[in-house]
Image (cartoon, grey):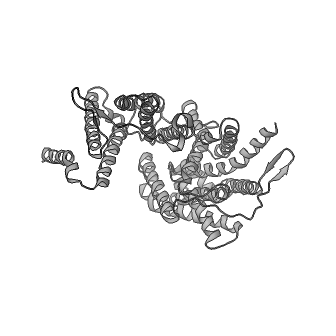
Amino acid sequence: MDQLLQHLLNGLLLGATYSLLGIGLTLVFGLMSVVNFAHGEFYTLGAYAAFAALTVASVHFFLAIPLAIVVGAAAGAVCERGLLRPLRGQSIDTVMLVMIGLWIAMQNAELLGWGGVAKSVPTPFPTQPLVLGPVSVAPLRVFVFVVSAALILGAHLLLARTKLGRAMRATFQDRETAALMGVSIERIHTVTFAFGAGLAAAAGALLGPVFLLYPSMGDLASLKAFSVVILGGLGNFAGAALGGLVLGVAEELGAGYVSSGYRDAVGFLMIVAVLLLRPSGLFARAERVG
Amino acid sequence: MRPVALLLGLAAAATAPFWVWNPYHLHTLIMAGIFAVLALSLNLLLGYTGQLSLGHAAFFGIGAYATALLTVKLEWSPWIGLLAAVVLPGLAGWVIGRLALKLRGAYFVLLTISFAGCVSLVSVNWMDLTNGPLGLPGVPALEIALPGLPALSLRTKVAFYYVVLVAVVLAYLVCLALIRAMRWTARPQALGPDPP
């Protein structure tokens, strides 16, 4: 029983970062109809940006995370202006191929810049776990969870309460009508992509210290983000937030009770199962997939 | 002009071991041939049906493991291994295709990536079968044994180059025949823009 509690707690703590990854991806898909296979690369970028800020510029740990978000969002904005804007009106498959190209290019740029050796990020947190009754948890993980939850809440408030958020939701619902009402679609697209990239970079900067940094770390992050988004339904914010927690818990249970080697298979199997059995997502409205 | 270029290209490919002296360059040519077969396979799917499979590595891997396991663990003839490397991934492709081709675009891409991810995790984690990340060394070379002659091992780079060259040409001809055969039934290009 205690073991189960421990797995559930670990799963929820990890799942919050998956939610963060998934929300960025789902917003970009819902608003821009872009299947962003380079999403994981913004995660890698965030992790390396935090690492560079900590080790090269030796800024404080708590400042490195917002810096990484800014770097990720800026890179996202540049990609949107340089790559996606010229492709507006092209078919979704064409844009997807370009994003796959961006994924490969960014990954090899990381490899060129940082080398293939895994790096670990120093943190100010003690490694001694906090013991809370029957379960124990590393302080770093709690910090990661709290920041992730705060960012998800912030993203929700931005979408639900601000003028920019209203413009984004309007664009999501009906691009043409939103444009007629004076919403600058171009600007909304840049902001949305930068926002999604920033959230991915935040997840990278948060999970970087938990795991190790290496250039291909974004591949798994992308696939987790896609599992989350497929689980929640493409374009569904709440679905992505919930889907992240579901994936985190499912992975933790799979690793704990089946085999830790197959931890990453949970996400893959979820994609396969959901796509074949309930392709519109577990909590979603219908969308044509075939 | 085209037949002349084709003949020149074929002649260059057929004589390559005689003017490519550097073994590394020959090795590169061999790898290029192997990946040409892989690209032909992807072209059949992406070029003619418009579906992008990012899971092709899985079929490549299943083929490689089929040959390696049959020849190393069961000590079967490498020729049977080679045949199994065509048949088994073909069967896997049929099953995956039946399931995955219900989906289009990004959904198809994701399903194929996920399938490849599962195959890769199994090959890394199933130590007893695949020897995990250490791999399966000692896959025997192909041999040609004609009656009355000593067995000819195709282990050298030059011999293997010709094995690969034959494979590329065969794969090309099979793809061509397949597309020709489908011309008057369900022309696969027609599936590209607007599937049923």
Does residue A176 appear anywhere in the picture? no
Badge count: 0
Q: Residue at x 47, y 59 (%)?
A: A108
Say whether residue A139 is left or right of residue A248.
Answer: right
- Would you identify the image quadrant in which residue A267 lies? top right
Name above or below for residue B25 compared with residue A235. below
Q: Quadrant of residue A150?
A: bottom right
- Which corner quadrant holds the N terminus of chain A? top right
Q: Quadrant of residue A134?
A: top right
Residue A138: horizontal and vertical position, in percent?
77, 54
Q: Nearer the viewer, residue B82 or B94?
A: B82
Residue B88 location (% of width, % of height): 42, 29
> Residue sitting at 46 percent across and 54 percent down?
A104
Q: Is residue A93 left or right of residue A160?
A: left
Q: Position of residue B41 (x, y in %)?
A: 35, 38
Answer left or right for A51 relative to A288. right
At a point 37% along the width and 38% down the height, the residue shown is: B193
User: Going by the image, does A210 lie left or right of B149?
Assistant: right
Q: Residue most toward the right?
A: A133
Q: Residue at x 47, y 31 (%)?
A: B73
User: Is residue B4 at all visible to an observer of this figure?
Assistant: yes
Q: x%, y% of residue A152? A: 69, 53
